[in-house]
Amino acid sequence: MKFETIKALQSYFGRPQDRAIKKEISFLDKHCIDFIRLSPFLVLASADSEHNMDASPRGGAPGFVKVNQSGEILIPEAPGNNRIDTLQNVFSTGKLGLIFFIPGFNETLRVNGLASLSFEVAELEACRDERRAPKAVIKVVPQSVYLHCAKAFLRSKLWTLQAQVDRGVMPTAGQMISDQTGIAVPYESREAMELRYQPDL
């Protein structure tokens, strides 16, 4: 089956429910701000000028992402591997898609908007944690905001104890990357890896 137009694709799936359309708003209301305040984890979706896509996980203590008085989202750029894929994409296109997660919640918060990189001292300080101020902040002006339904989490049972997979069923990330790249590195236990990460957490 092949569809020649978006209209044909829409016709195949049928019209969405009115609630699914009307729930989309263009700003962060009280509920959205509270959701972000409780969220310790999000995924940022971005693309470069040639539409090459990227999705990047970000985490911190609940509330590590801030909402300023203007309703803009401030996401600190924590120490990482310095690939800065997301930052380069923001620089190129000025757009981001975000999904915020709260452990135990089956709903997520989705935000799409205009993005920019900020190095302003006040915004860096606003995102300071107990260890450091970030080197940069991703600022997002919301354009499309809505709560996403619980179906994906109910299907996956992600938060249930029974769904947890023993980490030992696969090699460490370092071992897998060594296999993929051919770059030989000494064996490192998960405990040693977590200890090595500590300065950047």
Image: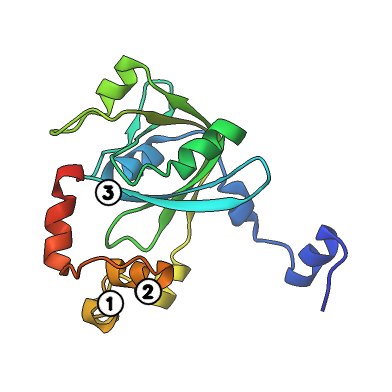
The residue at 17%/60% (across/down) is 193
Tell me how far mark 3 sits from mark 2, CA to CA: 32 Å
Would you name the residue on which mark 2 appears? 179
Q: Secondary structure at mark 3?
A: loop
Q: Secondary structure at mark 2?
A: helix
Tell me how far mark 1 sits from mark 3, CA to CA: 26 Å
Label 1 or label 3, whichever comes before in sequence order: 3
Comparing 33 with 191, the one in front is: 191
Q: Quadrant of the C terminus?
A: top left
Comparing 131 with 126, the one in front is: 131
Residue 187 versus residue 120 in the image, above or below? below
Question: In the rendered structure, are the residues bearing label 1 and label 2 in contact, judged by CB atoms less than 8 Å apart?
Answer: yes
Going by the numbered disc 2, the residue's amino acid type is Asp
The residue at 37%/63% (across/down) is 106
Callout 3 crowding tier (Cα within 10 Å): few <14, some 14–19, many ≥20: some
Callout 1 crowding tier (Cα within 10 Å): few <14, some 14–19, many ≥20: few
Position of 3 with respect to 92 (left or right) is right
Residue 106 versus residue 139 in the image, above or below? below
Position of 129 with respect to 47 (left or right) is left
**Colouring scheme, one of rainbow, by chain, secondary structure, one colour:** rainbow
Please give the count of numbered marks on the rendered protein. 3
Question: In the rendered structure, are the residues bearing label 1 and label 3 in contact, judged by CB atoms less than 8 Å apart?
Answer: no
Would you name the residue on which mark 3 appears? 40
Would you name the residue on which mark 1 appears? 171
Going by the numbered disc 1, the residue's amino acid type is Pro
Comparing 126 with 106, the one in front is: 126
Comparing 114 with 176, the one in front is: 176
